[in-house]
Amino acid sequence: MDILVFTTSVKEKRQVNKVTSLLTKVPSIFQWNFDLEDCDNILRIEASGLSPRYIERLLLNAGIHCQELEY
């Protein structure tokens, strides 16, 4: 299992709802969550064999900026 961490432009619950419909359709994602209290509006994903670029493109196509954080 991999843990992917992203900074995002998501700031409101309605945007989280938009992302929910996208991420729940990805079968290799086991769990995900947002930390909107963090200044980078962190998205954390637990998945298997999922490319960070795939998530970045998926959210970008929905109008949401998303960039992987190196840790």
Image (cartoon, grey):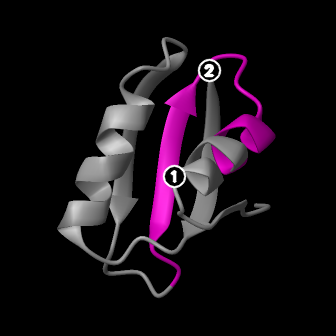
> Which residue is rendered at x = 31% and y = 50% of the image?
18
Marks 2 and 1: in contact by CB < 8 Å? no
Q: Residue 35 carries which label?
A: none
In the displayed structure image, the side of residue 38 where residue 2 appears, left or right: right
**Which residue does the numbered mark 2 point to in the structure image?**
1
Q: Is residue 41 left or right of residue 15?
A: right
The residue under the point 43% across, 33% down is 23
C-alpha gap between disc 1 and disc 2: 26 Å
Task: Give the vertical position of 8 relative to 1 (above or below).
Answer: below
Mark 1 or 2: in front is 1
Q: Is residue 46 above or below residue 48?
A: below
The residue shown at (77%, 31%) is 51
Q: Which amino acid does label 1 sit on?
A: Ala
Q: In this view, does 56 lie above or below 11?
A: above
x and y percentages locating residue 64 in the rendered image: 53, 63
What residue span does the magenta drawing correspond to? 40-56
Q: Which of marks 1 and 2 is nearer the N terminus?
A: 2
Looking at the rendered structure, the kind of residue marked 2 is: Met
| Neighbours of disc 1 within 10 Å: few (<14), some (14-19), many (20+) | few
Q: Is residue 66 found inside the magenta-colored segment of the image?
A: no
Residue that mark 1 sits on: 62
**Label 2 secondary element:** loop
**Where is residue 63 drawn, in percent x and y?**
54, 62
Q: Is mark 1 on a helix, strand or loop?
A: loop
- Quadrant of the frame with the N terminus: top right
Depth order, front residue of 66/49: 66
Instruction: Report the residue that reaches farthest toward the top.
Output: 27
Question: Residue 70 at x, y = what percent?
Answer: 79, 61
